[in-house]
Image (cartoon, rainbow, N blue to C red):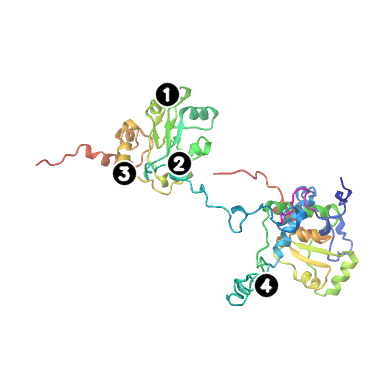
Amino acid sequence: MSAARFRATSGRVHLFNLHPAPGSQHTQKRLGRGRSSGLGKTSGRGHKGQKARSGNGKPKAGFEGGQTTISKLFPKRGFVNANGKTYAAINLDKIAHWVEQGRLKSTPEEPITARELVLSGCIHDPHDGVKLLGSGAEQLKVPIHIVPSRASKSAIRAVEQLGGSVFCRYYNRLSLYDCVKGRTDRVAAAPTRREDIMWYTDWRNRGYLSEKSIAKMPVVEERWRELATQLTKFKSQEFEKK
Amino acid sequence: MSSLIRPRQGHNPSDQLAELDPTVFAHPIRRDILHLCVVHFLDSLRQGSANTKTRAEVRGSGRKIRPQKGSGMARLGDGQSPMLVGGGVAFGPKPRDFSTKLPRKVIQMGMRVGLSARVKEHRLRVVESLDWPGFKTKDMAQRLSELGWEKTLFVTGRDAVPVGLSRSSSNLQRVDVTTADALNVYDLVKWPQVVLDVEAVEWMERKLGKRPGEGSTVL
């Protein structure tokens, strides 16, 4: 308890009586400046050895002294699918909870999309799209109208039993971004890959390009109607047999 | 309120009152915040032009000065080693930037604390206008001694300082003029007395006052 700590600075504020908050500033560690500093001579490095050398005294990261490293011991396996999609899974129990709290509302004309889910905090990041899953379906009591990227069969069944509607719509990276940001100036792309086309023209998945969906959906773009007829034409086409 | 310009007959400027926002002008005094702001400002002023030559930059050849073995003396390479007289400097200063970063909101708080400190010491004055008529330094010096205003900083809320005031006071050492947007915490702490005009007070309150409904984030 030194008396020097006391500062009688209740006078006027000027350049000569400003001080930093006590404890806010720490003195620098200065190596090699004499014995009393505690960091003289070997400057906190001990004696000799690899760690005492100038430059970077360490071997490269992951080096185990010559022993085969853990990253080299095991063989490589598999490949990474460039076309793979990670969907943001959302279960019916969470949606039920959100609807009960009043954080999510839906009508057939304004269904729940990725945008509503993100804004209400149900989902934090839509990744490559939103997939509706059926865990906790018993907790859903009211009809909801939702348009995800994908939906599981049990989720579709549960929602439709209560009188709601599920239609799965294709979103690529750009159209998902526009959906979440609420931009309507750009045209959302249609699916181009065969797997996607087969999936979204199937009523069992409630794909938006299947005939029944076009008939049932309240808001249908002209493009989709045209696409639905075009993309399913192959089913009735036949090759000329010679 | 006070008045720089000589008031008309029968008109006492002290009859008028200027209402000041307590958030800006009655802020609790935080000397440590002022310290941070002043140190940040002074750092930004540093030229940082100290320079020395390293052993690579000193003029000289790379020839080995004496043989490795046999001379009985220490082994030496080229003549520019920092060990030798006339050699380069090891770890000497190089031109560098000493400016530091300080959060914008800390500087804003510093402004509020600075203004509040001057108000607390009864050294902040508000005038109707700073349009000083005339250009003679002598007249200005006389008026200031009449008012008893020594070491004053005049702050105007306009885009540029009024010509009359700036010309009359430019040669006066104990007086300075600035615009409200060029005002910084260092000036507020340095000058014992600060005189604001009404536009400057409004500018301060607009820039530093609390805005209702601030702080909500929207997607």
**Of the residues tagged 1 and 3, which is closer to the observer?**
3
Distance from the alpha carbon under mark 1 to that under mark 3: 33 Å
What residue did someone put label 4 on? B84
**What is the three-letter code of the residue carrying label 4?**
Leu
Read off the residue under disc 2.
A127
Residue type at numbered disc 1: Leu
- Local crowd size for mark 1, using a 10 Å CA cut-off: few (<14), some (14–19), many (≥20): few
Query: On the rendered image, what quadrant is the N terminus of chain B found in?
Result: bottom right
Please indicate whether residue B48 sits to the left or right of residue A102 in the image: right
Q: Are marks 3 and 2 in contact (CB under 8 Å)?
A: no
Tell which tag, 1 or 4, sits nearer the viewer. Answer: 4
Q: Which residues are magenta?
A: A19-30
Q: Given this view, does label 1 or label 2 mark the residue nearer the observer?
A: 2
Residue nearest the viewer, comparing A60 with A207:
A60
Q: Residue B47: x, y in percent?
A: 69, 68
What residue sits right under mark 1 in the picture?
A162
The reply to whether dot 1 and dot 2 touch (C-beta < 8 Å) is: no
Subunit of mark 2?
A: A
What residue is drawn where x is 48% and y is 23%? A139
Q: Which residue extends farthest top?
A: A138
Residue B141 position in % (x across, y down): 86, 71
The span from disc 3 to disc 4 (Cα, nearest Å) is 74 Å
Residue bearing the label numbered 3: A193
Q: Are marks 3 and 2 on the same chain?
A: yes
Q: Is B9 colored magenta in this rendering?
A: no
Q: Is residue B69 visible?
A: yes
Going from N to C along the chain, the mark reached first, 3 or 2, is 2
Q: Residues within 10 Å of mark 4 (few under 14, many from 20)?
A: few
